[in-house]
């Protein structure tokens, strides 16, 4: 690891102290995890502390860790919100991860008051993963349709969805109806046919 990243990791350990649950260094980047109860305070510290100064929020994304690596996740470790930050002053980057304590109603604090650009990004994570951001003043869907049911990037969301939309010529309007596509499993030909691809000819 470079001396610069080593210095950043030392500063993070000192400044965040007991709020820091983990610090991972991988592929020239640092990712830290804090608890949901410390998330807002830690984010404010990362932005305002003179030795850190992560003044620019690059992105927020949701993550669904159910069956991550084909292993069931522990309770309270299914949904996470991940922030990607940049310090222009110190020229370093950081990822901050926080898990939602309740898998059935995933929620963490909003960071819109710290970085106004978080507004649409938190709305996207809410829309696609169902993560609620407490304190967000306008948390509504941003990518899916108004009547959309569910959150399409959750791992338990069906590929075909729950409803479909089509134009009805009789009523001359768009209607919603239950999905009419029958689910099917496509097995590659190479798997289902014994001897397919054999080059040994008599």
Image (tube, grey):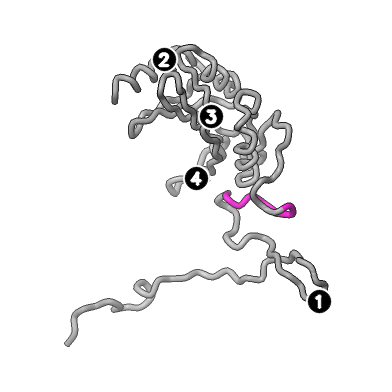
- Choose the circle earlier in sequence order: 2 or 4: 2
Rendered image: mark on residue 57: 3
User: Where does the N terminus fall, quadrant-wise?
Assistant: top left
**Rendered residue at 49%/18% (across/down):** 53
- Choose the circle earlier in sequence order: 1 or 3: 3
Out of 55 and 70, give the one closest to the viewer: 55
Rendered image: mark on residue 11: 2
- Choose the circle earlier in sequence order: 4 or 1: 4
- Please name the predominant secondary structure of the magenta segment in the image: loop
Asked if residue 112 lies in the magenta stretch, the reply is no
Q: Position of residue 111 (x, y in %)?
A: 62, 27
User: Where does the C terminus fall, quadrant-wise?
Assistant: bottom left
Q: CA distance from mark 2 to mark 1?
A: 67 Å
For label 2, count other residues whose C-alpha is less than 10 Å away and answer few (under 14), some (14-19) or many (20+): some
Where is 58 relative to 21, above or below? below
Q: CA distance from mark 4 to mark 3?
A: 31 Å
Secondary structure beneath dot 4 equals loop
Q: Position of residue 10 (x, y in %)?
A: 38, 16
The image quadrant that residue 169 belongs to is bottom right
Single out the mark in the foreground, 2 or 1. 1
Q: CA distance from mark 1 to mark 3?
A: 50 Å
- Choose the circle earlier in sequence order: 2 or 3: 2
Q: CA distance from mark 2 to mark 3?
A: 19 Å
Region rendered in magenta:
146-153
Rendered image: mark on residue 170: 1
**Rendered residue at 70%/28% (across/down):** 135
**Rendered residue at 44%/12% (across/down):** 14
């Amino acid at each position: 690891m470079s001396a610069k990243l080593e210095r950043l990791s030392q500063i993070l350990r000192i400044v965040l102290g007991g709020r820091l649950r983990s610090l991972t260094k991988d592929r020239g980047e640092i990712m830290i995890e804090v608890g949901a109860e410390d998330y807002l305070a830690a984010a404010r510290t990362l932005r305002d502390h003179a030795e850190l100064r992560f003044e620019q929020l690059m992105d927020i994304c949701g993550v669904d860790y159910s069956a991550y690596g084909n292993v069931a996740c522990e309770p309270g470790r299914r949904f996470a919100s991940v922030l990607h930050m940049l310090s222009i002053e110190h020229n370093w980057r950081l990822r901050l991860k926080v898990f939602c304590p309740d898998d059935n109603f995933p929620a963490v604090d909003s960071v819109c008051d710290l970085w106004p650009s978080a507004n649409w990004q938190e709305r996207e994570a809410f829309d696609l993963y169902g993560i609620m951001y407490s304190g967000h003043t306008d948390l509504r869907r941003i990518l899916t349709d108004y009547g959309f049911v569910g959150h399409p990037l959750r791992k338990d969301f069906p590929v075909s969805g729950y409803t479909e939309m089509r134009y009805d010529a009789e009523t001359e309007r768009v209607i919603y109806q239950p999905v009419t596509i029958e689910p099917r499993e496509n097995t590659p030909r190479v798997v289902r046919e014994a001897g397919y691809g054999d080059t040994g000819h008599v």
